[in-house]
Image (tube, rainbow, N blue to C red):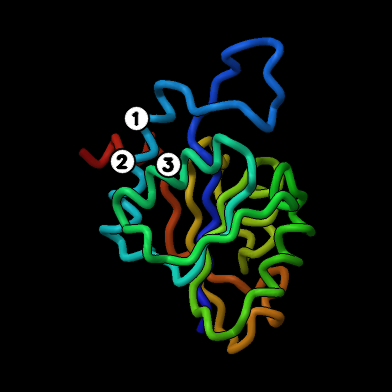
């Protein structure tokens, strides 16, 4: 059994028109949403064995909020290839994960994250809704090897957004 968590970075801002997209930082709202999402990840025990994070500044800042809650002991790989990656690229990276890691969190960007979440879902009724900033989709796969993760083979076990978390309080 493998568990996969797809996390889109928290809300970012532009700051300056001269700022490169890769260097954008979290907005005030992003800095408020990320710790709440991190707490929910911890509460639901969606804590991974490994984190693969885009090299973009906003994803690394989201990661810092997550680590403040779940700890810094979980190995992290910062991967430039995840920056604005397509669903196919993200899936290819997931399939390369070492099998001794039973759970993986991928922290990246749309549209790749939403597209992959919808590709991985089994029946059409399980498709994830819109995938806003700081959304997390949690999947289980009845496989022994990451290379066996295929389109339509995932079971969506959880989906949360800052808005859904706010509605619960």
Q: Nearer the viewer, residue 126 or 51?
A: 51
CB atoms of marks 2 and 3 within 8 Å: no
Identify the residue under disc 3.
161
> Residue 129: x, y in percent?
55, 45
Could you tell me which secondary element the residue under label 1 belongs to? helix
Q: Residues within 10 Å of mark 1 (few under 14, many from 20)?
A: some
- The circle on residue 36 is 2
User: Going 64% across and 49% down the picture, which residue do you hit?
Assistant: 113
What is the residue that sits farthest to the left in this orientation? Answer: 169
Instruction: In the rendered view, tell whether residue 27 sits above or below residue 123.
Output: above
- The circle on residue 47 is none
CB atoms of marks 2 and 1 within 8 Å: yes
User: Going 38% across and 49% down the picture, which residue do you hit?
Assistant: 66
Q: Which of the two labelled residues, at mark 1 and mark 3, occupies the earlier sequence position? A: 1
> Residue 132: x, y in percent?
54, 36
| 117 on left or right of 155 | right
Identify the residue under disc 1.
32
> Residue 107: x, y in percent?
56, 51
| 168 on left or right of 2 | left
Q: CA distance from mark 2 to mark 3?
A: 10 Å
Q: Which of the two labelled residues, at mark 2 and mark 3, occupies the earlier sequence position? A: 2
What is the residue that sits farthest to the top in this orientation? Answer: 17
Instruction: In the rendered view, tell whether residue 17 sits above or below residue 125.
Output: above
Q: Nearer the viewer, residue 36 or 83?
A: 83
Could you tell me which secondary element the residue under label 2 belongs to? helix
Between label 1 and label 3, give the one nearer the viewer: 1
The reply to whether residue 126 is visible in this rendering is no
Q: Residues within 10 Å of mark 2 (few under 14, many from 20)?
A: some
Between label 2 and label 3, give the one nearer the viewer: 2
> Residue 164: x, y in percent?
36, 40
């Amino acid at each position: 059994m493998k568990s996969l968590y797809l996390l889109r970075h928290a809300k970012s801002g532009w700051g300056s028109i001269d700022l490169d997209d890769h260097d954008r930082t979290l907005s005030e709202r992003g800095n408020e949403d990320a710790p709440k999402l991190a707490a929910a990840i911890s509460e639901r025990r969606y804590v991974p064995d490994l984190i693969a994070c885009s090299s973009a500044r906003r994803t690394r800042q989201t990661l810092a909020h997550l680590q403040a809650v779940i700890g810094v002991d979980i190995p992290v790989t910062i991967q430039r290839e995840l920056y604005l990656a397509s669903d196919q690229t993200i899936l290819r990276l997931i399939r390369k994960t070492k099998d001794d890691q039973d759970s993986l969190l991928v922290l990246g960007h749309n549209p790749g994250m939403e597209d992959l979440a919808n590709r991985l879902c089994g029946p059409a009724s399980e498709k994830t809704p819109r995938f806003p900033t700081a959304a997390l989709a949690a999947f289980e796969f009845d496989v022994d090897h990451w290379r066996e993760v295929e389109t339509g083979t995932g079971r969506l076990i959880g989906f949360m957004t800052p808005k859904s978390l706010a509605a619960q309080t």
